[in-house]
Amino acid sequence: VQLQASGGGLVQAGGSLRLSCRASGIRFTVSAMGWFRQAPGKQRELVAKITSGFREIYADSVKDRFTISRDNDKNMVNLQMNSLKPEDTAVYYCNAYGPRLGRSYESDYWGQGTLVTVSS
């Protein structure tokens, strides 16, 4: 299973960024997809998740600012981040929870991470 994330970068506070993650090797339509982040010196935390049924779950800190979406035709999950704050600075990781192709049991998979830096 491969999760290829892109879209990180440097942005000023109040700006926007869009992260994308393309998944391969996984049964995408039955998998939950999500974004986690890890800031320096902190634990990795959930940012947003979207289930196979398109239910969206957000951390309180990003509600009303971030939007997660998925495209099952392209095996992609996106995170639109608006009104960014310096405290959003972190490495963002794409996550998939589901069965790989040819399997029925679910596992956790992680992408390589993409850095988001928000300057004040």
Image (tube, rainbow, N blue to C red):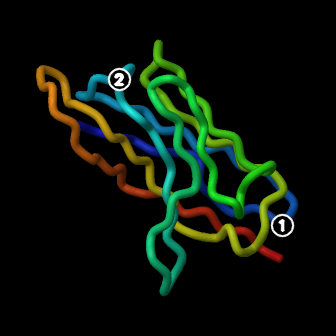
> In the rendering, at what x and y percent does residue 10 appear?
69, 63
Q: As drawn, which residue projects farthest toward the left?
A: 102
Res 80 → quadrant: top right
Quadrant of the snapshot with the N terminus: top left
110, 6: nearer the viewer: 110
> In the rendering, at what x and y percent does residue 55 appear?
57, 31
For image coordinates 78% across by 68% down, the residue present is: 85
State the mark number for residue 72: none
Res 83 → quadrant: bottom right
Neighbour tally class for label 1: few under 14, some 14-19, many 20 plus, Cα within 10 Å: some
Amino acid type assigned to the residue bearing label 2 in the image: Val
Distance from Cα at disc 1 to Cα at disc 2: 36 Å
Residue that badge 1 annotates: 13
Q: Is residue 94 left or right of residue 81?
A: left
For image coordinates 49% across by 70% down, the residue present is: 38
Q: As drawn, which residue projects farthest toward the right?
A: 14
The secondary structure type at the circle numbered 2 is: helix
Which numbered disc, 1 or 2, marks the residue closer to the eye? Answer: 2
> In the rendering, at what x and y percent does residue 94 appear?
44, 48
For image coordinates 12% across by 25% down, the residue present is: 103
